[in-house]
Amino acid sequence: MKPFLRQQLARFADRLGELEFLLSREDIMQDMKQFLVLSREHTEVGAVAGRWARYQQREADLAASQEMLSGSAEDEEMSAMAQEEIDSASAELAQLEQELQRMLLPKDPDDQRPAFVEIRAGTGGDESALFAADLARMYTRYCDAAGFKTEIMSASESELGGYKDVVLRIEGTTMTNAGPCGAYGMLKFESGGHRVQRVPATETQGRIHTSACTVAVLAEQDEAEAIKINPSDLRIDTYRASGAGGQHINKTDSAVRITHIPTGIVAECQDGRSQHSNKAQALKVLTARIHEKDRSERAAKDAAERKSLVGSGDRSDRIRTYNFPQGRLSDHRINLTLYKLLGIMEGDLGDVIEALQAYEAAQQMAALELNA
């Protein structure tokens, strides 16, 4: 392992001791906000320090086994045992080093946040709307398996049962090789254009059609961020909700549409029972969209940062093709091809997401080594 990585890992071990001392103080519970910040950092630092401790232990095991091997040349059984341990320790050390490198990469501060996933039907008419529903189902199933909580914030259904557009809110944390990760961190590379090639249910002559949807993944901001929006910059409209929801939702003007006048960004919510809850949810979506707009503009100005990312996340970027006749999924950003499309559509997205994260980690590590 390179010296600069060892130095960084040693700092994590020192910081873990500091955090354990701070969290043990009696007065820490009097400031719950600070306690939560320290607890979150303790979880992240502890994950790195734990892997580093394991790495050091296996290094010691490897050194002891190498010494045993050199001193037992005449004892075949001891030599075989020593060589077996050397092979085992070497393999685990290589894996641990990869994990630790990923853990040390710069963290996106939004990775731990809940996410909004917006799916909009594009070219292809009814078939595009049906594909939008398939994508929503795919993400929901993936999130269920990962332990995330998913809810529909708003939806506009098509006549054939698909979605013209749908917004999902996803919340939770899952463990990865690089430590705990939130919904946004797991799904952020899904932003862009998704193309499907298949025979639509409405096609009578068996011809393959191509249609598309766009996906945007937005990080939900803290409530404090929402306060930064000037209320005078907002136009709030209420209207009667449409679609499923029972008699109450259809008899009152409970649906809310909020427009941010300076940017023209709009968010709406109609799935809650009250105007108050719909307004709160719509404001969260609006804040996330404004934040994402600012984020995209900053990234566009920084060419070096853009090169380190897996695509720009722009809706116009065609990132993936779902070819049903061949059972093939192709992610065009990293030249990934998988022939298990039906499983992926059932929520088995793990291989795709891990490949995207690994590619991004490799790009970031190369940049770190270049600047070291």
Image: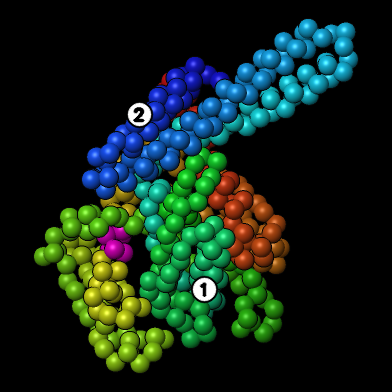
Left or right for 110, reference 201: left
Q: Earlier in the sequence, mark 2 or mark 1?
A: 2
**How many numbered markers are drawn?**
2
Name the spot of residue 192 as percent of width and height, x first.
46, 57
Residue assigned mark 2: 18
Relative height, residue 122 to residue 321 (above, below): below
Residue visible at 31% across and 64% down in the picture: 285
Which residue, as the protein is rendered here, is positioned at the far front?
Answer: 26
Query: Looking at the image, which is closer to me, 180 or 353?
Result: 180
Whether residue 315 appears in this view of the structure is: no
Residue assigned mark 1: 133
The residue range painted magenta reads: 284-290
Specify whether residue 37 is painted magenta.
Answer: no
**The quarter of the displayed image where residue 146 is located:** bottom right
Dot 2 crowding, Cα within 10 Å, few <14, some 14–19, many 20+? few
Label 2 amino acid? Glu
Mark 1 falls on what kind of element?
helix
Name the spot of residue 272 as percent of width and height, x first.
33, 78
Residue visible at 25% across and 58% down in the picture: 223
Which circle, 2 or 1, is nearer the viewer? 2
Label 1 amino acid? Ala
Name the spot of residue 149 as percent of width and height, x first.
46, 63
Residue visible at 41% across and 86% down in the picture: 244
Q: CA distance from mark 2 to mark 1?
A: 49 Å
Relative height, residue 58 to residue 46 (above, below): above
Relative height, residue 50 to residue 189 (above, below): above
Left or right for 52, reference 209: left
Residue 370 numbered mark, or none: none
Dot 1 crowding, Cα within 10 Å, few <14, some 14–19, many 20+? many
Mark 2 falls on what kind of element?
helix
Left or right for 180, reference 229: right
